[in-house]
């Protein structure tokens, strides 16, 4: 355990180290150069983390790693929950049916496409294909680990799927803002937010990509991404039922509920009541920005190129196909949903 009596001090050192790197990222974001380019501290944080991961990470004390992992998981979820203070039910309603429909279509079609290409065309085993597809379709590594709880597959298959998610999700996080700024995506800010939220792999990557363009894009992207995250529950239920029918046994799997997505909605609902003053909300948002910067910096510190060496070729090819599908197919899904819903 990260905060057991033996590990507590080392874990805190790891967290403080991430906080130091995040402070540097925040300081850089205040420089005129980065302000002019409107580059968020979250993006600077992950870049600094990636530079560190591929240069000096080998010198990091082993015990500090639990602190970094705490930031990538627990702190990230806390940051997303607090992000609800930037959003109201009016904004959620504005994303509306179009955002919900885009999320459902992207998740469903990506899972179906991933299964048929992975199993039928590439001849991947069922578990690797489904894990890789779920990571692309729903919420990245969290979906892979949740699927593992139902499939009970070997650990290496999950590691392969997570590796593809980290690789292509990170590429997407930098690619989407760049393509948008070049004017190659003919979407307004609201629609761009839906597009990012509906198609990028990880929650953190969605926050990073949205923040790189602007607050409105980030808010809409996070709302749509939370819809995708909450779709994890019906997907797991459906998979459990299918597997129980195939095996002829009753499924007794413990259901994994993404509570942070539920709490995000609760906080947004509370924020909609306007019970807190503007000053208090501003302080909360400032704290939240630092928490998210820490999560992104830690994510970068975990993105070492050496982790991708063992990723299977066919799984990588499937993830690449799904990555292209999310960019192209997701574009048309978003366009159709915003036009007709």
Image (spheres, helix red, strand yellow):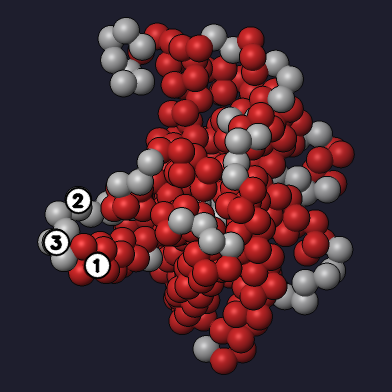
Calculate the distance from the C-alpha at mark 2 to the C-alpha at mark 1. 19 Å
Q: Nearer the viewer, residue 115 or 183?
A: 115
Q: Is residue 62 above or below residue 46?
A: above
The quadrant where residue 192 appears: bottom right
Q: Is residue 15 above or below residue 47?
A: above
Residue drawn 61% across the image and 53% down it: 314
| Position of residue 214 measured from the top left corner of the image (x, y, whole percent) | 68, 57
Earlier residue among tags 2 and 1: 1
Q: Which dot marks residue 249?
A: 3
Q: Quadrant of the N terminus?
A: top left
- Circle 1 packing at 10 Å, graded few (<14), some (14-19), many (20+), is few
Which residue corresponds to mark 2? 254
Residue drawn 32% across the image and 7% down it: 6
The quadrant where residue 47 appears: top right
Residue drawn 66% across the image and 29% down it: 306
Judge left or right: residue 275 versus residue 125. left
Circle 1 sits in a helix, a strand or a loop, which is it? helix
């Amino acid at each position: 355990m990260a905060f057991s009596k033996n590990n507590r001090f080392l874990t805190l050192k790891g967290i403080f180290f991430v906080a130091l790197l995040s402070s540097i990222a925040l300081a850089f974001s205040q420089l005129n150069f980065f302000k002019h380019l409107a580059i968020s501290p979250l993006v600077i944080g992950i870049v600094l983390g990636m530079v560190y991961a591929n240069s000096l990470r080998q010198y990091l004390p082993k015990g500090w790693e639990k602190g970094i992992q705490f930031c990538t998981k627990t702190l990230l979820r806390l940051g997303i929950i607090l992000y609800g203070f930037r959003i109201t039910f009016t904004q959620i309603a504005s994303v509306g049916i179009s955002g919900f429909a885009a999320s459902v279509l992207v998740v469903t079609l990506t899972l179906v496409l991933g299964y048929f290409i992975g199993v039928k065309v590439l001849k991947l085993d069922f578990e690797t294909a489904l894990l890789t597809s779920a990571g692309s379709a729903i919420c990245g590594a969290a979906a892979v680990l949740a699927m593992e709880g139902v499939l009970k597959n070997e650990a290496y298959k999950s590691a392969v799927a997570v590796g593809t998610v980290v690789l292509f999700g990170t590429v997407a996080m930098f690619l989407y803002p760049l393509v948008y700024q070049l004017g190659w995506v003919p979407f307004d800010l609201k629609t761009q937010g839906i597009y990012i939220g509906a198609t990028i792999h990880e929650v953190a990557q969605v926050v990073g990509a949205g923040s790189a363009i602007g607050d409105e894009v980030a808010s809409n992207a996070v709302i749509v991404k939370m819809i995708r995250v909450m779709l994890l529950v019906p997907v797991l239920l459906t998979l459990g039922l299918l597997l129980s029918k195939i095996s002829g046994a009753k499924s007794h799997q413990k259901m994994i509920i993404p509570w942070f997505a539920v709490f995000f909605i609760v906080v947004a609902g509370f924020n909609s009541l306007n019970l807190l003053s503007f000053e208090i909300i501003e302080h909360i948002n400032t704290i939240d920005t630092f928490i998210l910067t820490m999560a992104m910096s830690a994510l970068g510190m975990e993105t070492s190129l050496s982790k991708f060496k063992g990723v299977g070729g066919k799984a990588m090819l499937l993830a690449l196909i799904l990555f292209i599908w999310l960019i192209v197919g997701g574009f048309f899904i978003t366009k159709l949903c915003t036009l007709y819903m």
